[in-house]
Image (cartoon, grey):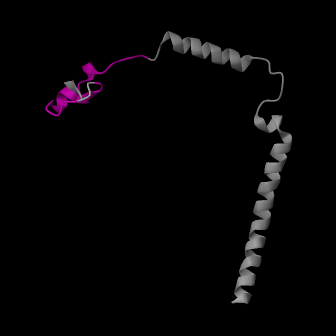
Amino acid sequence: MSSINQAGQFPVADPAAPFADMAALRSAPVSFGYYQEDVARRQAAVEHNRAVRKGPIGWWNRHPALCTGVSFVVACNLGLLPLVQSAVLTVLRNAF
């Protein structure tokens, strides 16, 4: 049903194989989503989420000056950009 490519690394679909053979469900690997490492990973994530935090969570709580600066830049940009655009267009309209 499949063959190895020229380099001998990856299986490729055989162009001569009929579609029914390629679409057969019996040839597909079946898993039910339960692996031992998934259970261990989930338990570690639950323990991490239930841990007692010693400080603020999130960069916005750890860096209040940076958060204030970003907020100020966004507010100025939103507030002053139309004003600057209007002034530039007025100057260009009157200059030419």
| Residue that appears at 58% across and 15% down | 41
Relative horizontal placement of residue 92, taking residue 8 as reference (left or right): right
| Residue that appears at 80% across and 51% down | 71
- Nearer-the-camera pick, 78 or 66: 66
Residue 49 pos. (x, y %) = 70, 20
Residue 36 pos. (x, y %) = 51, 9
Q: Is residue 70 magenta?
A: no
Residue 73 pos. (x, y %) = 79, 55
Q: Quadrant of the C terminus?
A: bottom right
Outermost residue toward the front? 7
Relative horizontal placement of residue 14, taking residue 88 as reference (left or right): left
- Nearer-the-camera pick, 91 or 35: 91
Q: Is residue 29 magenta?
A: yes
Against 44, residue 9 (above or below) is below
Outermost residue toward the top? 36
Residue 15 pos. (x, y %) = 17, 34
Against 80, residue 2 (above or below) is above
Against 91, residue 8 (above or below) is above
Which residues, given as a range, are shown in magenta?
9-32
Q: How many marks?
A: 0
| Residue that appears at 75% across and 17% down | 51
Against 91, residue 37 (above or below) is above
Q: Quadrant of the N terminus?
A: top left
